[in-house]
Image (cartoon, helix red, strand yellow):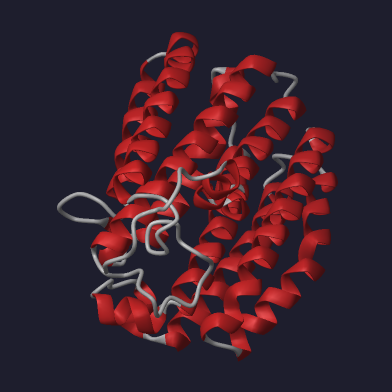
Amino acid sequence: MTTAAPAAPPSLRTWLLAARPKTLSAAVVPVVVGTGLALGQGMAVVWPALAALAGAVLIQIGTNLTNDYYDFRKGADTHERVGPTRVTQSGLIAPQSVLAAGAACFALAVVVGIFLVARGGWPFVIIGVASVLAGWAYTGGPYPLGYHGLGDLFVMVFFGLVAVPGTFYAQALRLVPAVWPAAVAIGATGTMILAVNNLRDLDTDARAGKRTLVVRFGRGFGRAEYVTLLLLALAMPVVIVAMGWSRWPVLLALLALPLAWPPLSRVLRTTGAALNPALGTTARFQAAFGLLLAIGAWLGHP
């Protein structure tokens, strides 16, 4: 677990590495979809949308930084790591600096949340507190969610079932039925990214006692989870149209399907470090799917 102390103050580039920009689609896409739905209803409002975006990105970065710190402290990140560089384990940034930066991101998210509370009232108190606590508890605290197989549920809930309706509500101050299947779709695509991560880290997580669902149930389960989440996401635009909550443009989201093949192929055929490219390509699929779903929701409202 030990690593050398940083020889010099970390650069901006190093801090960007710590923030893990390739993961930020999981925070941005739900806001884009919620805003697309609000546009379709004629209820979009710029400042609440921007506040929701800022809060989501800050919570995502805060979660990434605290995850970097606690995975190092708990021994999940070692010299055997096969994933992208982690700044704490590699000695690029001092552990306490990483933890402090994560706390600062959570604090800034609370500041942003004050604006949303002023606009939308008590629901945003609950959303904000729960999101920050869950982000910290993902790998920190007495019962870290990621270490007990609850990381997948965390992503589905907070990056889908909370973020999409929350973004819509921040602008419209009410909810419509279409937000829920849209939220399921985006939560599923975000969880696909985590599933790739857990498949890649299966061996090192098992040695560190990090009991992800893949560690608990095996590589076959992880691959089946990825496929199931993909099918679930693709089914939701069809559900929205079938229920009469929007018109056919929502189905534009299905045009993103070809982008799902490269990561799916890797997930089904490779292990370990060979899965690293599947993280980026899964995030790319999520971004395209979410953008097309948002455009479809905007254009397709009855």
How many labels sit on residues?
Answer: 0
Q: Quadrant of residue 263?
A: bottom right
- Which residue does the image show at 38% across and 31% down from the upper left? 104
- Which residue does the image show at 50% across and 10% down from the upper left? 119
- Which residue does the image show at 44% across and 21% down from the upper left? 113
Question: From what the image shows, is residue 165 above or below residue 23?
Answer: above
Task: Please provide percent x and percent y for residue 65.
Answer: 41, 48
Q: Residue furthest top?
A: 118
Asked whether, in this view, residue 162 is left or right of residue 29, the answer is left
- Which residue does the image show at 72% across and 59% down from the upper left? 284
Question: From what the image shows, is residue 198 above or below residue 22?
Answer: below
User: In this rendering, does residue 45 appear at all?
Assistant: no
Nearer-the-camera pick, 259 or 164? 259
Question: From what the image shows, is residue 274 above or below residue 293?
Answer: below
User: In this rendering, does residue 84 appear at all?
Assistant: yes
Viewport quadrant of the C terminus:
top right
Asked whether, in this view, residue 154 is left or right of residue 252, the answer is left
Nearer-the-camera pick, 76 or 78? 78
Task: Please provide percent x and percent y for residue 278.
Answer: 64, 72
Q: Residue furthest bottom?
A: 269
Task: Please provide percent x and percent y for residue 49.
Answer: 63, 24
Nearer-the-camera pick, 184 or 19? 19
Viewport quadrant of the N terminus:
bottom left
Q: Quadrant of residue 215?
A: bottom left
Task: Please provide percent x and percent y for residue 201.
Answer: 43, 77
